[in-house]
Amino acid sequence: MATVNDKRPVNLDLTTIKFPVTALASITHRITGVAIFLALPILLWMLDRSLASPESFAQLKDLLATPIAKLVVWAMLAALIFHLVAGIKHLIMDLGIGESLEGGRRGATLVFIISVVLILLAGVWVW
Amino acid sequence: MVTSVTSFSRNGVSDWLVQRFSAILLGAYFIGLFGYLVCGAGVDYAAWHALMTSVPMKIINTLVILAIAAHAWVGLWTVTTDYLTRMTFGGAATGVRLAAQALLVLLLAGYVLWGLWMIWGA
């Protein structure tokens, strides 16, 4: 039976919703998670080449010295770093720390700040 | 209690715990591995090969590849159930979602076998 409640407007269209910082941290955590999943074959392939023989190790090392490979490695590190920092924030919140609205906003902001710093440092290390 | 036949353990609380345990293992592993690579500037084949083929590292790598598969499944299950819905795919949503989830399971199973082959086969 239809009730008046069925007519309530529902907007779950992500493209029209303004994202607060907590939502941005959440969706970035998801996007980086999917990105890491997509990077898994590259990472496994690199592990395979690094261990197969001294020759394949040297070939991989030469490949990783090229600008495009460095960009790919940095992109993968960036995704890993954000996902790790955001994940640590989740574990801290699981302990009951920063669960208020204000605490959630501060935590999400901190995740972005710490991630950007670490991603820049990773870039310095790659180049 | 809400259960779903496609979730990792058919139990959200259990999935939550699997996600936390695997996260702690993976976080510690990648921080350790990254620290090793950053500090041991210019790691050569002999040192790298000796480290990765030592029995403790073989055991750790086995746990890590299993943790990656479990963690990725819980995460990707959440993502697929959130976005591959009637709102995005209409009446075809259930089929699309199940097909995507089946593909993800096959890929993850393949990665686990590939990882185990590298760790124990070589």
Image (cartoon, rainbow, N blue to C red):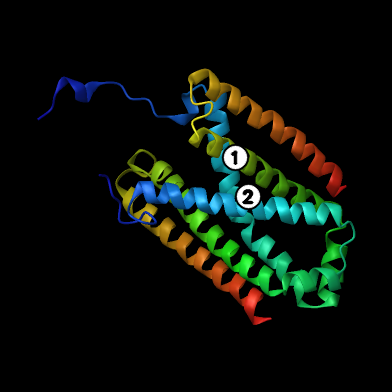
Label pair 1/2, CB-CB below 8 angstroms = yes
Q: Which residue is nearer to you in this view: B26 or A115?
A: B26
Q: Chain of mark 1?
A: A
Judged from this view, the residue extending furthest toward the left is A1
> Horizontal and vertical percent for residue B76?
48, 51
Give the residue at mark 1: A88
Residue shown at 42% from the left, 42% from the top:
B83
Residue located 49% across and 20% down the image? A101
Write down the residue under mark 2: B27
> Where residue A81 sits in the image (x, y, percent)?
68, 43
Question: Residue at (65%, 51%) from the top-left corner?
Answer: B28
* Local SS, label 2: helix
Find the distance from the CA under tag 1 to the CA under tag 2.
Answer: 8 Å
Q: Residue furthest bottom?
A: B121
**Residues packed near mark 1 inside 10 Å, few (<14), some (14 to 19) or many (20 plus):** some
Instruction: Give the chain of mark 2.
Output: B
Report the front residue among A117 and A63.
Answer: A117
Mark 1 lies on a secondary structure that is helix
Q: Which mark is residue A24?
A: none
- In the image, residue B37 sits, relative to residue A3, either above or below, namely below
In the image, is A66 to the left or to the right of B90? right
Specify the amino acid type for callout 1.
Ile
Q: Quadrant of the N terminus of chain A?
A: top left
**Residue, far top:** A102
Residue type of the residue flagged with mark 2 = Gly
For image coordinates 79% across by 49% down, the residue present is A71
**Quarter location, residue B82:** top left
Whether residue A11 is visible, yes or no, is yes
Residue A125: x %, y % from top left: 85, 46
From this view, report whether residue B83 is shown above or below residue A5. Answer: below
Q: Is residue A81 above or below residue A57?
A: above
